[in-house]
Amino acid sequence: MPSISAIMVSWHTGPVLFEAIKAVLADPDITELVLIDHENPPAVRKMLDDLARDQTRLRIVRTNKNLGFGRGCNIGATHAKSDFLFFINPDAEPDAGAARRLVAALPCEEPTAIAGARILGTDGREQSGSRRRELTLWRAFAAFSGLARLGLARPFGMENDALPEAPVQVGAISGAAFAMAKSGFDQLGGFDEGYFLHVEDIDLCRRAPSVWFVPDAIVRHVGGTSRASRFAVELEKARSFLRYFWKFNTGAAGRIATVIAAPVLFTAIMLRALISEITGFLRR
């Protein structure tokens, strides 16, 4: 049985953090859980320290500053002692055996391959992002403009496609729950720390030789209770998408297309955030 280090990054996650930790440590396949504490509140830090004293497989690494998701994961990977890394969100609860199934799905001949979990919401349905097609400017525009929901364009997400019976190759998976060999993660250079939040997982998948969706590796995404502004989160998402396209759409044609699409994508993402805020306010 290969050794597996779980990597979790937390910043003001909320009460669900401890349920996520509990679920990870309940899995005997996990050798250790390396938790990167990005300046959580003092009360939460004390609870984490108390828990770490009782749980020898829990290791707390403190940064004393919110350094972003990708950089936090990279820090966690440097502290990991296992052959394989299992990255898991602090508001997600993996079923027992999920990490082992992800590792088992990794092809031995490709040390830099990635295997992603099937992520379910609280309603039991597969969440958007578990499995995705390759990200293009058109697919991003179709997703944020609503064209994909109206059936006028092929969606970026594949959650509504038929569920495969075995691991299958996809364009990308979600950074909320995935595994890869530590040597492969190091070989790829880890996450691009130029992304503060969002899209860093798609970037990593773009650099991997193969990406696998593993349907029987189930992770339940509860959702955090962070008080982070929705607009601040969506602003980071917009910046990250534009960084991704500028990075990979090289050449004159690609750069021109990115410049033309940039204001459209930015507006679509922020408008979606505004609609969500208004809808949430009206439901209160």
Image: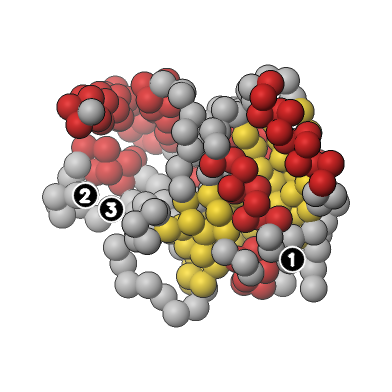
Work out whether mark 1 precedes mark 3 in sequence or the reverse, and give the earlier one: 1
- Seen at 37% across and 61% down, the residue is 124
Residue 148: numbered disc: 2
Secondary structure, mark 2, is: loop
The quadrant in which residue 272 appears is top left
Distance from the alpha carbon under mark 2 to that under mark 1: 41 Å
- Badge 1 crowding class, 10 Å Cα cut-off, few under 14, some 14 to 19, many 20 or more, is few
The residue under label 1 is which amino acid type?
Pro
Work out whether mark 2 precedes mark 1 in sequence or the reverse, and give the earlier one: 1
Please name which of the two marks, 1 or 3, marks the residue nearer to the observer. 1
In the image, taking residue 284 as reference, residue 10 lies left or right, namely right
Seen from the viewer's position, the closer of residues 206 and 26 is 26
Work out whether mark 2 precedes mark 3 in sequence or the reverse, and give the earlier one: 2
The residue under label 3 is which amino acid type?
Pro
In the image, taking residue 135 as reference, residue 207 lies left or right, namely right
Q: Position of residue 265 (x, y in %)?
A: 30, 30
The quadrant in which residue 75 appears is top right
Q: Do the residues labelled 2 and 3 touch (CB within 8 Å)?
A: yes
- Seen at 32% across and 41% down, the residue is 140
